[in-house]
């Protein structure tokens, strides 16, 4: 995913600021390779969609810190919860439009699914919805 982003810091700020995605920035407090100011600029450009976690240390070895691991876990959990809520909203709207009732069942990975809604097809959960997931 990161390979598709520009390497020029100014273009990166521009691209991230315009995107709809959530961003987690992990940065070493004493990093001499990539200045902390760059992470702060990215964080500011992304606004509320961004989480900045500054970790004691330099450029290397950050992933060994517990704070790093907690930040990644918390971020991924919040993204998963947002996705699940969005899918439930979409499924509910489709069910209301089509007169279908939600079974409100949960499939592997916590993805909400309604029989016949097609959400399972869209998220690739592998559950055979009645609309032909297979």
Image: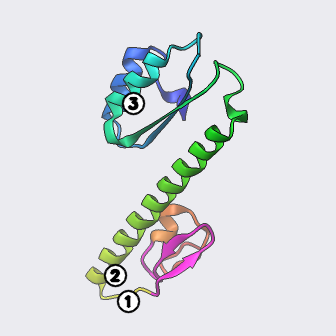
On whether residue 56 falls in the magenta region, the answer is no
Q: Nearer the viewer, residue 124 or 49?
A: 49
The vertical placement of 15 against 21, above or below, is above
Choose mark 3 or mark 2, whichever is in front. Answer: 3
> Where residue 130 appears, x then y in whole percent?
50, 82
Q: Quadrant of residue 116?
A: bottom left
Q: Which residues are magenta?
A: 103-118
Q: Nearer the viewer, residue 45 or 125?
A: 45
Q: Main secondary structure of the magenta part?
A: loop
* Residue at position x 62%, y 39% in the image: 67
The residue to which callout 1 is attached is 101
Q: Nearer the viewer, residue 2 or 99?
A: 2
In three-dimensional space, the C-alpha distance between marks 3 and 1, rounded to whole angstroms, equals 42 Å
Q: How is the image coloured?
A: rainbow
The residue to which callout 2 is attached is 95
The residue to which callout 3 is attached is 43
Instruction: Judge the density around disc 2: few (<14), some (14-19), many (≥20) Cα neighbours within 10 Å.
Output: some
Q: Nearer the viewer, residue 49 or 71?
A: 71
Compare marks 1 and 2 and give the one earlier in the sequence: 2
Q: Quadrant of residue 118?
A: bottom left
Which numbered dot is residue 49?
Answer: none
* Residue at position x 31%, y 33% in the image: 18
Q: Secondary structure at mark 3?
A: helix
Whether tag 1 and tag 2 are in contact, CB under 8 A, the answer is yes
Whether tag 3 and tag 1 are in contact, CB under 8 A, the answer is no
Q: Residue furthest top?
A: 32
Quadrant including the C terminus: bottom right
Compare marks 3 and 2 and give the one earlier in the sequence: 3
- From the viewer's perspective, tell me whether residue 72 is left or right of residue 119: right
């Amino acid at each position: 995913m990161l390979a598709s982003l520009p390497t020029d810091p100014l273009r990166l700020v521009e691209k991230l600021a315009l995107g709809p995605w959530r961003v987690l920035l992990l940065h070493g407090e004493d990093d001499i390779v990539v200045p902390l100011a760059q992470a702060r600029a990215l964080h500011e450009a992304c606004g509320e969609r961004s989480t900045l976690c500054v970790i004691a240390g330099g450029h290397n070895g950050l992933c060994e810190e517990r704070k790093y691991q907690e930040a990644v876990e918390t971020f991924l959990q919040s993204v998963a919860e947002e996705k699940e809520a969005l899918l439930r909203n979409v499924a509910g709207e489709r069910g209301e439009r089509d007169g279908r009732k939600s079974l409100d069942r949960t499939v592997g990975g916590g993805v909400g699914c309604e029989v016949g809604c097609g959400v399972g097809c869209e998220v690739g959960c592998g559950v055979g919805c009645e609309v032909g997931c297979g």
